[in-house]
Amino acid sequence: MGPVIEIQNLTKRYGGRTAVDGLNLEVENGEIFGFVGPNGAGKTTTIRIMATLLEPSAGEVRIGSHLVSKEPAGVRRLVGYMPDVFGLYRDMKVWEYLDFFAACYHIPESVRPGLIGDLLELVDLSHRREDMLESLSRGMQQRLSLARTLIHDPQVLILDEPASGLDPRARVEIRELLVQLSRMGKTIFFSTHILADVAEICTRVGILEAGKLVAVGELEALQQQVMPRRTVEITLLDNLETARKLLESLPAVSALKEIGGQNGRCRLELEFIGDDQALSQILAWLVQAGVQVVRFSAESRDLEAVFMRATKGLVT
Amino acid sequence: MAENLVTPEALKQSSPRPNFGQRLLLWLRGNPVMVKELRSRMRGRRAFLILTLYLLALALMVGLVYFLYLSSINRSPAALTNTRQLIGKVVFAVVVGMQLVGITFIAPALTSGAISGERDRQTLDLLQTTLLPARSLALGKFSSALVFMLLLLLAALPLESLAFLFGGVAPEEVAIGTLLLIVTTINFCAVGLFFSGLMKSTLASTVLGYAFPILTIFGLPMMALILSGFFGPLISGSFNNNLSPGTEQALLLLGWSLVSIHPIATAVASEALLLDQHTLFSYQQTLRNGASVTLISPWIPYTIINLLFSAVLIYFAIRFVRRRAR
């Protein structure tokens, strides 16, 4: 089965400014894809094109078997779209909001009450069914918004900053909901600038900057790709020479140096290129060679560091 | 209660060919925007307040006019029937006139924010990504406003019927008056909808949505007055001289067409034809050279022109909703 979202050479220009610049991206069925980038990188523009709201200047987006520019109705059937703002209707109750959008998707009137009940249960808002929309907290509105995107049982969810403006608890709740939806077989494409969300739940990540995709892949691979070299610090009780020889013989290790020690301990610092598997192998070899290791720490490569390394702070 | 409501599915199953009423109900209930708008509009005190204030204003005016007339009538038995009929006519004219003013101010309020308001709330994006056709959105907004306006017109019927108590008002006059009010309402609602689709902000669309009806109702007569001040003597001068039959006919038709685009002028001219020529539809006007021209009663062209104009405006409003951002 091919990718469910296929973005080919997508370009969007506003006058002389290029918001999205030759973007190529594929998202497989069932993925949770995190679309990361600084403000103004072109995330919302890309998402609005995917949601059939904006015409691209060049390039094409295919969702399922439908081209966004030629078959918007087919795309709308497949996609549940949540914008970065909650479209609030005053004078409307929670169930009426869902009922209205269900009707907009031509869902028969007889089916709607059951469907609305199920969705409200999913997003934990059953107890607010009869309340007016204005009385809901920001987190509840966001959950209701998510329920709205699910009303026609879409295959793909396209969510623009689903966790922005939420308190930590509400953010975790949304995150858990997304994981739950992914388990239900939905493909989730969401933009964010909150990196913790991405690290927690995404199967793959794309980093966008100044309209261009600067990095894409699984988080682990991305870290590898963006930050191949990392610093490792080792503290030994003895056998400094054995350790030094062993480490020097490894091609993945470079810039080995002694950085002093206390209480008879020695500390070594080295630059290492390789994955976590290879790194743990080094520790195993040291121990096998009889080196007494008391501390072995690799500089953490969290997403924030990857993000900072991948992007240059450019904004179109 | 819910099970008593007619569902579209139930209608489809129950009768293969629903009658007009059922079809209308099916259409109304089948348009989610219409259902949402009416539900929101009738919720709370706002709709009730508008209706009450509207009827109070009408009743006060009617009362005022009635007592003014009552104090000035000639109480001799011979004159009484005539006076009573006159009061009937005046009450009817006041109610229709007040309704026209009401339409002028309420119809734009209901429609000039219809689409731009969705833009402001950023809900238009949501609607555009659903399977709701642009046509349903625009028509839903339009018809929900229209239905509420018709409710106002309908609610004023008892006041209008007071005229029957006095006599002097024929059913034809009531029919034409009501038709003109409905057509004008349709037109002003369509104008508001058009501007709400055209303009990006609700403020701009509200200003334009009000400007059009106000200029039509009050501006056109003022303009006609000013123009007649300038050209009146010229034309009457020409009449005294020998005006060619072609020019006379053209001037007559031009004047008649101008009358047919203004609701009050249309109502007055149609009424005059009804009273003087006893005709609802057309009459022959004899020119000075003896030839005759057939003139259609202005309510007919007024209705046709306004309905066509409204249809064009609604068509463009749908186009504005459908338009994808570039």
Image (cartoon, helix red, strand yellow):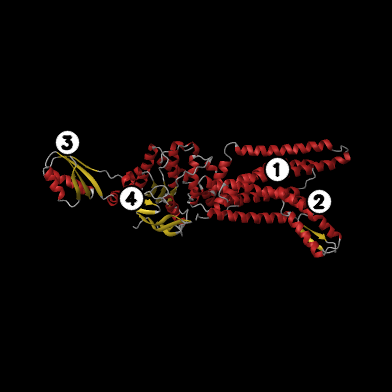
**Tag 4 secondary structure:** helix
In the rendered structure, the residue with mark 3 lies on which chain?
Answer: A
Parent chain of label 1: B
Q: Identify the amino acid type marked 2.
A: Leu
Is the same chain shared between marks 3 and 4?
yes
- The answer to whether residue B179 is left or right of residue B114 is right
Q: Which residue is mark 4?
A: A310
* Whole-number angstrom distance, CA of label 4 to CA of label 2: 86 Å
Please give the label number shown on residue B275: 2
* Residues under numbered marks 4 and 2 in contact, where contact means CB atoms less than 8 Å apart: no
Tags 1 and 2 in contact by the CB under 8 Å rule?
Answer: no
- Chain of the residue under the numbered disc 2 shown in the image: B
Residue designated by label 3: A262
Q: Position of residue B206 (x, y in %)?
A: 61, 46
Q: Which residue is mark 1?
A: B157
Total marks drawn?
Answer: 4
Camera-near label (2 vs 3) is 3
